[in-house]
Image (cartoon, coloured by chain):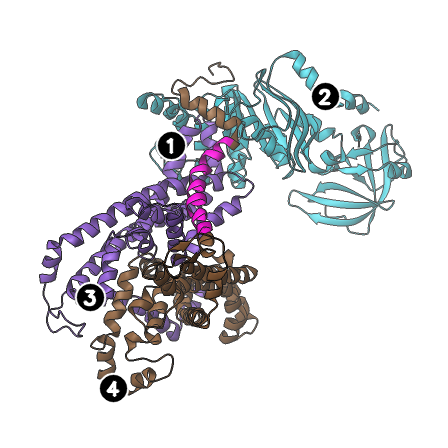
């Protein structure tokens, strides 16, 4: 064994070695350098913007000149509480809630099959089939429904072929959810939302179900539970955090969307559309800001409840 | 009492350090080293001196601070108090990559994205040694651990024992003066473990460098080490040769943890007419007779009742009830005449009793 | 094994439910591909009266589409680059050290996708208004990078969690300083996770429209071009062809991302 000192000599060490030594002695410095850029970015750009949004919502617009008055006032919030605006909020929240429930119903069999029974390439296929629409082509996916729901489109064609036209007509003649055609009704908007956000519901439920060991289901059966009982008493409670986690996405995404209802839907506004309209054509940025506080508050309440139900462990 | 003379030899850890330090420079020296994590005292004022060329074992249950101690020597942890010297040089604040100390990790920590030879050559790669030169040296190390034909394999393609040897070769290629081994045999099955014990010992003797290894397995510690430090709750409770530790435990903890031992409480000693004090008595020192022989010189005989018998393969473990206390001993397993409830006589030489400090 | 297999058959109802769900997710996209070849110009007639390839040629000649495509591509590339750097730094800090407030940092990074997109959009719009920043290429990039960071961050954190900390210690122990450890051990182990995160970030950015409408001003990215066509259709077949391109351009990186992380999971499972 070569006799060397305690301190090794490293020919290729140089300046980087000395900087490395410094970081070793002062780990806080390294942390600062690592965290600095992302924190400045998110902290300044994003949180700063949120603060700007909050500030903006306390400004108002001069009704005559149309200019933004940069003075603190609650006037904009008072306007927000008008019945017509509250209608928009209620409509959006109801839509988000029904989209969430139906997404969960459709997502469950997919997630359950993928978690419990799919193996090898089938599992991979399921995963990709959920990932692809989750990450991409938002606008194209909305567009696809414009094609489907058009009067001369594939849905009406199919309905006609199987002779269900009266059923669709009956649906469209219903108050509130009906309309002149599928692509100009809440039914249409609802279908698009469910289609858009379904993948966000599947993945967390699947993740929650993956964590249920098969032996636990066997134990339940072994102890005399019928499959239906096992589902109610074991599978569903264990999947619940996943469902809640998924519902955070479906709920939040529906609350904030303004493009889908613009392309497929009736002329009545959703929160996102109101925000977009106020900042754009109306030029009323304070009102847009105040309106966007609604989804933030709704989501904050929702997240607080979800956290209490243990949903974050399933994310 | 002939044995009591020796007890004071390693009376406190402090005196032992001074004694070793007076002779020659230690490879590793810990002086009052503590590592506290908030309120948790992982290592609490430990003094140790490990001479060059020694195979040193650190033995203790999990959470006793032995692994933290190893990590302090490697430089992954910094002591919250005390000083650490490696070959006489203080290494406070010296990062791991500047210490002539290398580690074999418990999970081996082989780099999954490199093949075996690149793993082994890593220490040379980062020193800027050329490819040909470092592969040649890495190959020599692989020959040392007899894995030369596996040089191009990926770590994931090796068995547990082979990975362990790759980790060993990788740690040795940089020619460290101290090799640290964290539970080196922990993940291996029994057969392989026994074989590796011999191999590690041989390797250490050939290389002549200091090995410091951590284990919770007392058999491993006793069979491989030149000296052993027994850890408990962040402190070193006893340091000594395996014989010292086994034959002459100084504390209840050591007597209990290393092998099994009968602890003779002062009150019990009084009852059976043994000399006063707190003693440990190893089970194999107790013999059974069927008659209460009159007292030989230095031999104690007590009447006992067999309260429990357990077959353990080569031996039977026998628990006796003596004056309301339990005394355990081993008898050859072919002794089948003992039955629970039988009255027997147990005898042992008083010299085999070892007085403990606490 | 045999015992397990007898129990692992899914009921027919479940199979039908799962397959029907997947068809619901993917049939509409297939329809887009079908419509790219239709000869019908004025309506969304189904089934298409006849099929033609001419619209691909028409799109190829359209400079406005090429411009929008180029803008989207540049934005996605720069936003992804920024997201990779920022996401990796944040992941390294959060995964490597325990420090006060690391939960808060995680939350902060996830916030841009946790809140509805319209909030992110209007927040940036308000900030630009208050700070008197005119809309430009960079205001779009700023918005995209903000919500792309979390994608890279999530991938990197997941990989770092699976990477044994003793790997980095082993490197330091063998004489590599911090930079060498980064280069020889950390980066090779993180690379595929970063690449996957980058791919997803690219797909997310290339296709983003909700935030972009608030930060683009008069500029036209490809999704904004599509949006205006959806609201006021001018040449439906051209839109159909562009939609097919958008699907392909965003699907490819996602498939690659899947491929990269799948390999990583396999080796991690193999280790112990």
The range drawn in magenta is A29-52
Circles 1 and 3, Cβ within 8 Å, touching? The answer is no
Residue C151 visible in the snapshot: no
User: In x, y percent, where is residue C83?
Assistant: 36, 44
> How many residues crowd mark 3 within 10 Å: few (<14), some (14–19), many (20+)?
some
Which mark is nearer the camera, 1 or 2? 1
Chain where mark 2 sits: B
Which mark is nearer the camera, 4 or 1? 4
Closer to the camera, B255 or A313? A313
Residue B12 is left or right of residue B212, and the answer is right
Task: Quote the CA–CA distance across marks 2 and 4.
Answer: 97 Å
Q: Which residue matches tag 3?
A: C233
Q: Which mark is residue C184?
A: 1
Chain where mark 4 sits: A
Q: Which residue matches tag 4?
A: A163
Closer to the camera, B155 or C170? C170
Q: Are marks 2 and 4 on the same chain?
A: no
Magenta includes B58? no
Q: Which mark is residue C128?
A: none
Residue B224 is left or right of residue C148, and the answer is right
Task: Quote the CA–CA distance across marks 2 and 3.
Answer: 89 Å
Chain shown brown: that is A
Task: Quote the CA–CA distance across marks 4 and 1.
Answer: 67 Å
Q: Are marks 1 and 2 on the same chain?
A: no
Q: Which mark is residue B14?
A: 2
Sequence-earlier tag: 1 or 3: 1
Task: Quote the CA–CA distance across marks 1 and 2.
Answer: 43 Å
User: In x, y percent, where is residue C239?
Assistant: 19, 62
> How many residues crowd mark 4 within 10 Å: few (<14), some (14–19), many (20+)?
few
> How many residues crowd mark 1 within 10 Å: few (<14), some (14–19), many (20+)?
some
Q: Main secondary structure of the magenta part?
A: helix
């Amino acid at each position: 064994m070569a006799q060397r000192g305690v301190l090794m000599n490293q020919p290729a060490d140089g300046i980087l070695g000395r900087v490395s030594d410094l970081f070793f002695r002062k780990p806080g410095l390294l942390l600062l350098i690592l965290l600095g850029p992302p924190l400045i970015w998110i902290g300044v750009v994003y949180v700063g913007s949120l603060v700007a949004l909050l500030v903006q919502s306390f400004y108002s617009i001069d009704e005559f000149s149309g200019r933004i008055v940069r003075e603190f006032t609650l006037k904009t919030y008072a306007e927000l509480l008008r019945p017509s605006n509250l209608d928009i909020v209620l409509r959006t929240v109801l839509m988000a809630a029904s989209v969430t429930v139906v997404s969960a119903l459709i997502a469950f069999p997919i997630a359950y099959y993928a978690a419990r029974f799919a193996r090898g390439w089938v599992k991979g296929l399921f995963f990709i089939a959920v990932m692809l629409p989750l990450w991409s082509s938002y606008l194209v996916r909305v567009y696809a429904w414009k094609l489907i729901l058009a009067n001369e489109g594939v849905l009406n064609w199919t309905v006609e072929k199987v002779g269900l036209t009266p059923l669709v007509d009956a649906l469209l003649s219903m108050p509130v959810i009906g309309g002149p055609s599928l692509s100009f009704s809440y039914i249409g908007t609802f279908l698009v939302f469910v289609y858009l956000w379904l993948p966000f519901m599947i993945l967390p439920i699947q993740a929650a179900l993956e964590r249920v060991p098969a032996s636990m289901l066997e134990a339940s059966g072994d102890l005399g539970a019928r499959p239906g009982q096992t589902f109610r008493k074991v599978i569903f409670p264990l999947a619940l955090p996943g469902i809640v986690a998924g519902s955070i996405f479906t709920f939040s995404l529906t609350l904030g969307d303004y493009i889908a209802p613009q392309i497929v839907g009736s002329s009545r506004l959703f929160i996102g559309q109101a925000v977009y309209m106020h900042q754009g054509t109306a030029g009323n940025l304070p009102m847009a800001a105040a309106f966007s506080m609604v989804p933030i508050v709704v989501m904050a309440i929702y997240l607080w409840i979800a956290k209490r139900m243990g949903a974050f462990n399933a994310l | 009492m002939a044995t009591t003379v020796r007890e004071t030899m390693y009376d406190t850890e402090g005196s032992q350090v001074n004694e070793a330090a007076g002779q020659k420079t230690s490879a590793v020296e810990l002086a009052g080293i503590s590592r506290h994590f908030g309120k948790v005292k992982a290592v609490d004022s430990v003094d140790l001196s490990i001479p060059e060329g020694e195979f040193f074992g650190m033995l203790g249950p999990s959470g006793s601070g032995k692994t933290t101690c190893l990590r302090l020597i490697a430089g992954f942890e910094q002591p919250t108090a005390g000083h650490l010297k490696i070959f006489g040089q203080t290494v406070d604040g010296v990062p791991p990559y500047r210490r002539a100390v290398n580690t074999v990790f418990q999970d081996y920590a082989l780099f999954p994205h490199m093949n075996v030879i690149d793993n082994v050559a890593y220490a040379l790669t980062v020193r800027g040694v050329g490819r040909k030169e470092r592969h040649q040296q890495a190959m020599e190390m692989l020959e040392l651990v007899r894995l030369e034909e596996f040089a191009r394999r990926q770590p994931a393609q090796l068995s547990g024992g082979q990975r362990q040897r790759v980790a060993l070769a990788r740690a040795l290629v940089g020619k460290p003066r101290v090799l640290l081994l964290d539970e080196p045999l922990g993940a291996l099955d029994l057969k392989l473990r026994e074989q590796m014990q011999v191999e590690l010992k041989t390797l250490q003797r050939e290389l002549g460098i200091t090995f410091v290894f951590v284990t919770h397995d007392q058999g491993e510690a006793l069979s491989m080490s030149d000296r052993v430090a027994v850890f408990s709750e962040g402190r070193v409770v006893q340091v000594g040769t395996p014989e010292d530790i086994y034959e002459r435990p100084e504390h209840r903890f050591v007597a209990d943890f290393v092998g099994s031992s009968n602890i003779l409480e002062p009150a019990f000693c009084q009852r059976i007419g043994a000399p006063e004090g707190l003693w440990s008595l190893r089970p194999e020192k107790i013999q059974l007779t069927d008659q209460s022989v009159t007292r030989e010189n230095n031999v104690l005989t007590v009447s006992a009742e067999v309260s429990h018998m357990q077959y353990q393969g080569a031996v039977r473990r026998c628990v006796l009830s003596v004056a309301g206390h339990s005394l355990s001993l081993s008898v050859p397993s072919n002794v089948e005449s003992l039955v629970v409830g039988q009255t027997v006589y147990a005898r042992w030489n008083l010299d085999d009793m070892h007085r403990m400090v606490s | 094994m045999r015992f397990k297999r007898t129990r692992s058959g899914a009921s027919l109802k479940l199979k039908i439910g799962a397959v029907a769900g997947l068809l619901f997710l993917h049939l509409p996209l297939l329809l887009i591909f079908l419509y790219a070849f239709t000869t019908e110009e004025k309506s969304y007639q189904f089934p298409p009266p006849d099929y033609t390839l001419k619209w691909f040629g028409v799109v190829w000649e359209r400079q406005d589409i090429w411009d929008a495509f180029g803008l989207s591509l540049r934005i996605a590339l720069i936003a992804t680059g920024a997201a990779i750097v920022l996401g990796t730094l944040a992941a390294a800090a959060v995964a490597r050290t325990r420090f006060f407030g690391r939960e808060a940092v995680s939350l902060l990074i996830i916030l841009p996708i946790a809140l509805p997109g319209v909030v992110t959009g209007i927040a940036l719009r308000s900030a630009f208004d208050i700070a008197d920043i005119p809309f430009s290429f960079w205001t779009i990039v700023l918005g995209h990078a903000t919500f792309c960071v979390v994608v890279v961050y999530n991938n990197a954190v997941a990989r770092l969690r699976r990477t044994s900390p003793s790997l980095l210690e082993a490197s330091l122990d063998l004489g590599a300083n911090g930079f060498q450890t980064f280069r020889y051990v950390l980066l090779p182990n993180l690379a595929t996770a970063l690449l996957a995160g980058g791919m997803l970030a690219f797909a997310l950015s290339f296709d983003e429209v909700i935030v972009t409408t608030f930060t683009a001003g008069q500029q036209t990215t490809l999704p904004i071009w599509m949006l205006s066509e959806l609201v006021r259709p001018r040449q439906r077949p051209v839109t159909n062809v562009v939609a097919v391109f958008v699907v392909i351009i965003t699907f490819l990186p996602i498939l690659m991302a899947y491929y990269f992380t799948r390999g990583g999971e396999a080796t991690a499972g193999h280790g112990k």
